[in-house]
Amino acid sequence: MIHYEKLVRDKIPEILDKKSVSYEKRIASPEEYRTALIKKLEEEVDEFSKEGNPEELADIMEVIGALKKLPEYQDVEKIRLEKLRERGGFSEKIILRGEK
């Protein structure tokens, strides 16, 4: 019976082996990998929003780093810097209130 099927960090199989935990491992196709990374990002963001701890933020950053390596996201840092230049960042802590 399958209890989970998800993308895991590279050393998790090694850790499970040391604990004698049985599992099946396979390598995702490029499209499945992209989808799994996005799902993992959603999972990590949800955990961070609930717990707010640095470990969850580190997990988010790791997933984002993996996404940035995919061909369709290779320009994301350039886009981020353009948006920073044009619209600014969040360092001034500005909160707006208004009507939609």
Image: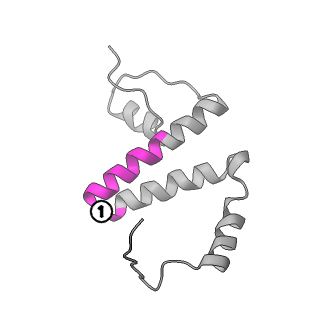
| Quadrant occupied by the C terminus | bottom left
Q: Is 46 colored magenta in this rendering? A: yes
- Taking the view exactly as shown, the residue that stands out farthest to the top is 1
Q: As displayed, is residue 37 above or below residue 64?
A: above
In the rendered image, the residue lying farthest to the left is 51
Say few, some or many: other residues with alpha carbon within 10 Å of mark 1 (under 14 / 14 to 19 / 20 or more).
Answer: few
* Residue 22 against residue 1 in the figure, above or below: below
Kind of residue indicated by mark 1 = Gly
Name the residue at 59% across, 28% down. 27
Q: Residue 3 versus residue 10: which sits nearer the camera?
A: 3
**Number of callouts in the render?**
1
Between 41 and 82, the one nearer to me in the picture: 82
Image coordinates of residue 1 in percent, x first then y, are 32, 13
- For mark 1, give the secondary structure: loop
Q: Residue furthest front?
A: 99
Q: Is residue 98 left or right of residue 11?
A: left
In this rendering, does residue 98 appear at all? yes
Would you identify the image quadrant in which residue 52 lies?
A: bottom left
The residue located at (66%, 77%) in the rendering is: 86
Residue 44 location, x and y as percent? Answer: 39, 50
**Range of residues picked out in magenta:** 39-54
Name the residue: 49% across, 59% down.
61
Residue sitting farthest toward the bottom: 92
Q: Is residue 65 magenta?
A: no
Closer-to-camera residue (38/59): 38
Q: How is the image coloured?
A: one colour
Residue identifier under label 1: 52
- Residue 33, given in percent of the width and then of the height, sits at 59, 35
